[in-house]
Image (cartoon, rainbow, N blue to C red):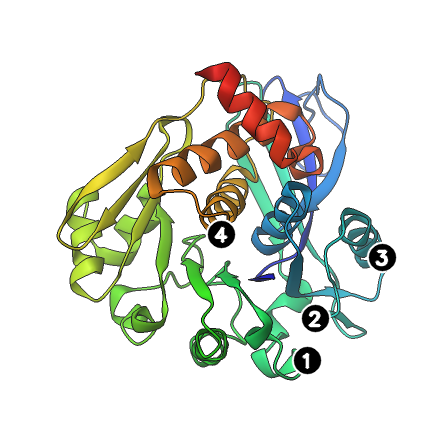
Amino acid sequence: MFIVVGTTTIDLFVSGIDQMPRFDGDEYTRSSLAWCSNPLTLTCGGNAANSAYVLAALGAQTALCSAVGSDLLGDTMVGWLAARGVDVRALLRSSTFATSTNTTLLDERLNRLNFYHPGALTHLRAEDSPPDFFAQASTLLITSYPIMRGFRPHGYHAALTEAKSTGATTAIDIGPAIGEPVTAAELSALLPLVDYLITNDYELGQCTGCTALDQGAERLIAAGARHVVVKRGKDGAVVYRPGASPVESPGFPVEATVTVGAGDSFNAGFLFALEQGMALAEALRFGNATAAMVVATGKSVLGAPTRDDVEAFIAHSA
């Protein structure tokens, strides 16, 4: 079973904005108004919920460790996840804190502004999970590292230790690089328990202080990382390993309508492919294809593909 730890967020998209508005007092004015060519969209969000939803769509047995409020948005999120087949027994329903929300403004060039409320997420702890929960994982994916303050860092260590005790494959995505980004020094105690450290160019630089991609990856490898997986958006992904040449896979050219959730979809596709026994390069390609299909749907992860869909997409793109 896949277990995914991290954020669960209701995403609200205001897109197709012709020009971002500006503050102009408390009146309804021309300069404070933006015309939108697209309707308002409400969708599944949060790194962990996104990855769990996509994994379930691919056909993987998946459980989510996260938190939402006991509110209408929490009910909506639980409904989406349960309908997709995600195990939500470790999804805490808080009566004190609200469901996390992220409101994203996207202009016609896909530049974006985000307004984020963490809600119940910052109060979730590893010990809130059911007994022996992480020992049930065949693959454990930890996401949203900087946001989950109740897990950082000792809760992460406990979850990884429990998963590793039963032979699970483990992965940490260190993004997003907001608040107090994770550092290489902080990761050093966790790296012996982590098979795949996942990041993107920006997060890698924030973590290591290195501006060059190769140097940043090498610093994490020197600290004990077994695999450093770097997501590069439309340019694909690359994996660095100790004592071996990097493994690269190009992205797939698609017309992206919403790019939010692309990295989470890659994580799901990549780790799913590894669990199916695919080689590293093949798993990278599967992850890239999964992400490309999600960003092209216009539905974010709610339009996540099945395994057959991804394989057909790859075959058609060959």
Picture residue at 80% right of the left edge, 58% below the top? 74
Q: CA distance from mark 4 to mark 1?
A: 24 Å
Q: Which residue is mark 4?
A: 275
Above-or-below relation of 240 to 249: below
Above-or-below relation of 110 to 72: above
Q: Which residue is mark 2?
A: 90
Of the two numbered discs 3 and 2 in the rendering, the one whose residue sits closer to the viewer: 2
The three-letter amino acid code for the residue at tag 1 is Pro
| Residue furthest front in the image | 277
Picture residue at 57% right of the left edge, 78% below the top? 126
Apparent side of residue 303 relative to residue 284 in the rendered image (left or right): right
Decide: marks 2, 1 in contact (CB < 8 A)? yes
Q: Which residue is mark 1?
A: 130
The three-letter amino acid code for the residue at tag 2 is Ala
Task: Name the mark on residue 75.
Answer: 3
Decide: marks 3, 4 in contact (CB < 8 A)? no
* Quarter the N terminus occupies: bottom right
Of the two numbered discs 1 and 3 in the rendering, the one whose residue sits closer to the viewer: 1
* Quarter the C terminus occupies: top left
* Mark 2 or mark 4: whose residue is earlier in sequence: 2
Q: Position of residue 103 (x, y in %)?
A: 66, 43
Q: CA distance from mark 2 to mark 1?
A: 7 Å
Picture residue at 67% right of the left edge, 53% below the top? 9
The image quadrant of residue 191 is bottom left
* Mark 2 or mark 1: whose residue is earlier in sequence: 2
Q: CA distance from mark 2 to mark 4?
A: 22 Å
Mark 3 Cα within 10 Å, few/some/many (few <14, many 20+)?
some
Q: Secondary structure at mark 2?
A: loop
The image quadrant of residue 99 is bottom right
* Mark 3 or mark 2: whose residue is earlier in sequence: 3
Q: Is residue 27 visible?
A: no
